[in-house]
Amino acid sequence: MSEAVTTEGASTADPLKTAADAMALAVQAAKDGAADARAKANEVMPAVGLFFSRLTYTTSYALSYGVVFPALFLARAIPKENAIVHGLIDGGAAARDAVAALGKANETPVAEAAPQPA
């Protein structure tokens, strides 16, 4: 007899109410899932930021050490009194002078730059 009661109770349930309950459960699950995802994202973001910060630092350190150390090693290995060193020094001085001349050529006085009334 108990089987008949449960079967009868299940068949008399409103299908729209059952669907509405299922939809309400789905909406609540989506809200809970979104809250959980937001919480996980808040936990992960500092870790991602730390990873990229560390990656940037390590890359910059390795690059600078990989470029500066060999350059200084070669500079110290070359004897000071020879034609190569004198050429590098003279070329560097000429480059500085050329850049300074370009900077002065690009500067124009304010009075000359203002248009003259006709």
Image (spheres, rainbow, N blue to C red):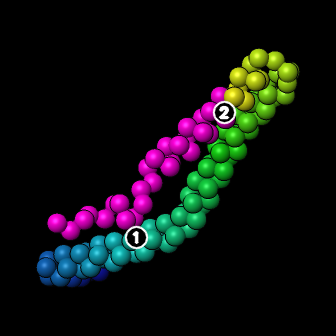
Crowdedness near tag 1: few (<14), some (14–19) or many (≥20) residues, C-alpha within 10 Å: few
**Placement of 118 over or under 63, stated as above or below:** below
What amino acid is at disc 1?
A: Gly
The magenta region covers: 91-118
Q: Which residue is mark 1?
A: 33
Q: Does residue 92 belong to the magenta stretch?
A: yes
Residue 38 % position (x, y): 45, 71
The answer to whether residue 36 is visible is yes
Q: Which residue is mark 2?
A: 92
Residue 29 % position (x, y): 36, 73
Q: Judging from the image, what secondary structure is the residue with disc 2 in?
A: helix
What amino acid is at disc 2?
A: Gly
**Placement of 52 over or under 23, stated as above or below:** above
**Nearer the camera: disc 2 or disc 1:** 2
The answer to whether residue 6 is visible is no
* Image point (50%, 49%), residue name: 104
* Image point (64%, 43%), residue name: 59
Residue positioned most to the top: 83
The quadrant holding residue 31 is: bottom left
* Image point (56%, 58%), residue name: 48
Q: Does residue 13 belong to the magenta stretch?
A: no
Q: Assess whether mark 1 and mark 2 are in contact (beta carbons under 8 angstroms).
A: no
